[in-house]
Amino acid sequence: MAALADFQLNVKQNWCPGCGDFSVQAAIQRALATLDLSPHQVVIVSGIGCSSRLPGYVNSYGFHTTHGRSLPLAQGVKLANRDLTVLACGGDGDGFAIGIGHTLHAMKRDIDITYIVMDNHVYGLTKGQVSPRSDLGFVTKTSPQGSTERPVSALELALSAGAGFVAQGFAKELNELAGLIEAGIRHRGFSFINVFSPCVTFNKVNTYDWYGQRLKKIADRPGHDRNNRLAAMQSVMETDGLITGLIYERSGQ
Amino acid sequence: MPQQISWKIGGQQGEGIESGGEFLAAGLAGAGFLLYGYRLFSSRIRGGHTNYNLRISASPVASLADHTDLLVALDQETIVVCANELAADGVILADEKISPLLPANAPGRLIAAPLTALAEQAGNAKMKNVVAVGITASLLKLAPAAWEKAMVEQLGAKGEEMVQANLRAFQLGWNYAEDSLQSLAGKYALEPADGVRRYYMTGNDAISQGAVDAGVTLMAAYPITPASEIMEAMVHELPKIDGVMIQTEDEIAACMMAIGANYAGKRAFTATSGPGLSLMAEAIGLAGMTETPLVVINVQRGGPSTGLPTKHEQSDLMAAIFSTHGDAPKIVIAPDSIASLQSDTMTTFNLAEQYQCPVILLSDMQLSLGKQTVAESDLQAVPVNRGKLIAAADLPELAKNQYFKRYQITEDGVSPRVIPGTNNGIHHVTGLEHDETGRPFEGAANRKAQTDKRMRKMKAVIRDFPEPVRIDAPFAQPRLLVITMGGAGGAVAEAVDRLRQGGVEVNRAQIRLLHPFPATILAPLIWAAHAVVVVEHNATAQLAWLIRSSCGQSAELHSVLKYDGNPFRPDEIVAGCREVL
């Protein structure tokens, strides 16, 4: 049995105290240990941004690539060696702005990797600009009058792009998140996990409390069937995407 | 008896121009002739003038001819477009159905032949191209047997009836020439060939073969003219060895996927043309910074932007060498023949792993889509060299919180490499500046040491790449040195031969390694020559610029440039050189 410590490193993260990404890292490490993987069998590929520094903090093989391009590189790794467990990760700018084309095509291509987006609705590493997930009216350095664009709906997008595994977690709910990541890695095919990972420095709106007051659990939806794509879409739309859990998994995969 | 004949068939796209040319070539290659084929086409699917030029010879040919000896015209536009290329005694064999007219002042003569009528007699008017091939075979004084075999090979899959109909069309054409073209009897009877059966292959075929021979298991690419044929070949070849060709969403993804597969220890590549190379620039820099092997095949076409997508040019030199930000280690090679594309592609994969950096193989449309007879003996096996790839058994145990020194500072600049999945080899990889273990690190001394390491390893490339400059220099102090690259080499070789026959002392150098530039090899050749001519297919004399900046200012460095979309003919190069003499 692999121990959590096997995946830990004594490297100090360059994240702000309170950043949601700490929990995401812990959840990934816990999932990898639970799955009894060896660190040298795991590759974590990331893009550019605060959250994309994550591979450097986990004891495994890691590749910190270019902005928005973690997915094609991660797919290349998996195609080259199918014995490896391959994770891709990054922020919402990485996955839904510069890299959104790769996100859609990775969902469509369905190669067996797990993609974790640390979604904080803001650009952190560049110190506070509007993101593709920012809500209408969100004020940043580059949207001083408030964002005039509607946010990309991550879950609706994944469901319509044909993703076979769609989940959403919250950095504060570590147990749920670790379970989702574990299930994503087990899923044979492309797994998409969006994680609300609050930025405590540049996003004073979408805070831990803000999410805590609004998030629903998919398991609490009456008659929830994770294999029903139409119902999954309905749950997402009715909650405006503020829902966590395993939203959808294609049956038989 | 003529040494060689230049034959051309022209018409509208969709009229069987390519298949007609291919059919003639198949029979001739089977009969052991040496061929050079080049197709002119437009960026559209049907309609628009297209032609297929086939140079037929008893000795090797690697360029277009100065003139066309026999032009088969399926429409009047072909006559209008191509008549000025005719030799003085050239012949246009035109379909009588189009009521062909010879333009005023056009050289040669026009013969109206019943191409469509004979095709209809054979069963279908579409087979007029095959009738024309039958006529040509008769004029070349060759027996139909060679084409019967070719017909079965090319059309066998479409059924016996199709084969028989086409054979009828061929025979009707052949008979027509025997009976009615007595005035041309003997005119095109070629010297006998050596009878050796050769492959008739494009440069893209050679690249695909080289990639398979090099042990590639993944290709990721996005369709683009004139490189798509490589994807289309690999999609059949790679599954046979448990590999895969992936058509990606764009060229950025293609390049990143190839980097990912190389990082994971498999030989992988992408192939593209100018616009795709521009998109790959950032990824190429990542491969340079992370010292990950990467092979990019770039088949040049007319630029900039969408430019001339179906026409020849050599204007991506600067983009290939410089198009990524920062000081990136990179190798750029430019093979010089269709056959060398096969072995140089194999070498390219070796270089990428030996030097742990991106290697760009610059082909051009003339090399990649031009077609040539290549003997089995021209295709070489280059032994696989995976560089400093370390196996798990050779690794000492890593202590807790320790990383493998993937970026260890070494004397030759190349660090030991392990791939993911290797026990005791865990390390980090990042496009950020990093320390020896791959951890991000901005320290000034480390920055300098790692940069110097990445640059230092490039020094040995000139030793490891076979013939960085292909030298043909019989004269110690020649009147002229002609320098060129890529597909222009065939026409240059022919032009140099002619100048020498005319008594001019000319040396020839073909640059095969563009970056790092082989200045130490080239400079002495330049110093020895009275004058230098650089022949290249671009408007800004990119190769000449590279030579000047690498070999120092040369007193007389002249350029012969062509950038109208068409490959050089030997006579154009002879004329350009004569101006300098």
Image (tube, coloured by chain):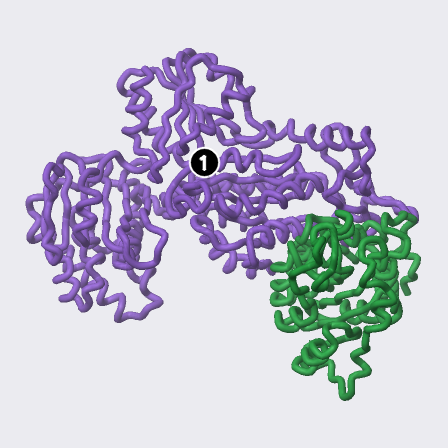
Chain colours: A green, B purple
Is the residue B200 above or below the residue B324 in the image?
Answer: below
Is the residue B362 above or below the residue A84 in the image?
Answer: above
Q: Percent position (x, y) of residue A87?
A: 75, 60
Binning the other alpha carbons within 10 Å of mark 1 as few (below 14), some (14 to 19) or many (20 upward) gives many
Q: Percent position (x, y) of residue B193?
A: 27, 41
Of A165 and B140, nearer the camera is A165
Residue B499 in which image quadrant: top left
Apparent side of residue B243 relative to residue B502 in the rendered image (left or right) = right
Residue flagged by tag 1: what amino acid is it? Answer: Ser
Apparent side of residue B383 relative to residue A241 in the rendered image (left or right) = left
Where is the C terminus of chain B found, in terms of image quarters?
Answer: top left
Residue B406 in which image quadrant: top right
Apparent side of residue A119 relative to residue B44 in the rendered image (left or right) = right
Q: Percent position (x, y) of residue A149?
A: 65, 61
Residue at 67% across, 80% down: A229
Where is the N terminus of chain B found, in terms of image quarters?
Answer: top left
Of A63 and B234, nearer the camera is A63
Which element type, helix, strand or loop, lies under badge 1? Answer: loop
